[in-house]
Image: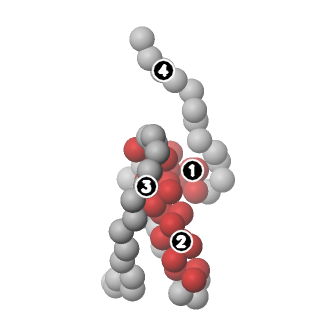
Amino acid sequence: MGRCLAAMTKEITGCYSVEMAETLVVHEGMVVAKRMSILNVVVEGDSASVINILNGAGMDCTYEGG
């Protein structure tokens, strides 16, 4: 069972998609963990596209609209 080691709030300004906002938040959490010398981190999420971006697969910027 895990435990909370830190928490923060931060305003994200700009016009971001939900996908990009989630990616930025996870990235910021990883930066905080690194600063705290926490090297064994498990990231869980329900968005495969966010996990793929974080793993280096890039972001699909195509637009599917009518």
Q: CA distance from mark 2 to mark 3?
A: 16 Å
Nearest-to-viewer mark from 1 and 4: 4
User: What's the residue type where badge 3 is placed?
Assistant: Ile
List the residue tagged with mark 1: 52
For the point 56% across and 27% down, which residue is it?
Answer: 62
User: What's the residue type where badge 4 is placed?
Assistant: Glu
Nearest-to-viewer mark from 2 and 1: 2
| Rendered image: mark on residue 12 | 3
Nearest-to-viewer mark from 1 and 3: 3
Q: CA distance from mark 1 to mark 3?
A: 21 Å
Q: CA distance from mark 2 to mark 1?
A: 15 Å
Q: CA distance from mark 1 to mark 4?
A: 20 Å
List the residue tagged with mark 2: 30
**Circle 2 Cα neighbour tier, 10 Å, few/some/many (<14 / 14–19 / ≥20):** some
- The scheme the figure's colours follow is secondary structure
Quarter of the picture holding the N terminus: bottom left
> CB under 8 Å between callouts 2 and 4?
no
**Circle 3 Cα neighbour tier, 10 Å, few/some/many (<14 / 14–19 / ≥20):** few
What SS does tag 4 mark? loop
Q: Quadrant of residue 17?
A: top left
User: What's the residue type where badge 2 is placed?
Assistant: Met
Quarter of the picture holding the C terminus: top left
- Compared to residue 15, the image places residue 45 above or below, namely below
| Residue 8 in picture, x, y percent from top left | 37, 74
Of 55 and 26, which appears nearest the observer?
26
Q: Earlier in the sequence, mark 2 or mark 1?
A: 2
**Circle 1 Cα neighbour tier, 10 Å, few/some/many (<14 / 14–19 / ≥20):** few
List the residue tagged with mark 4: 64
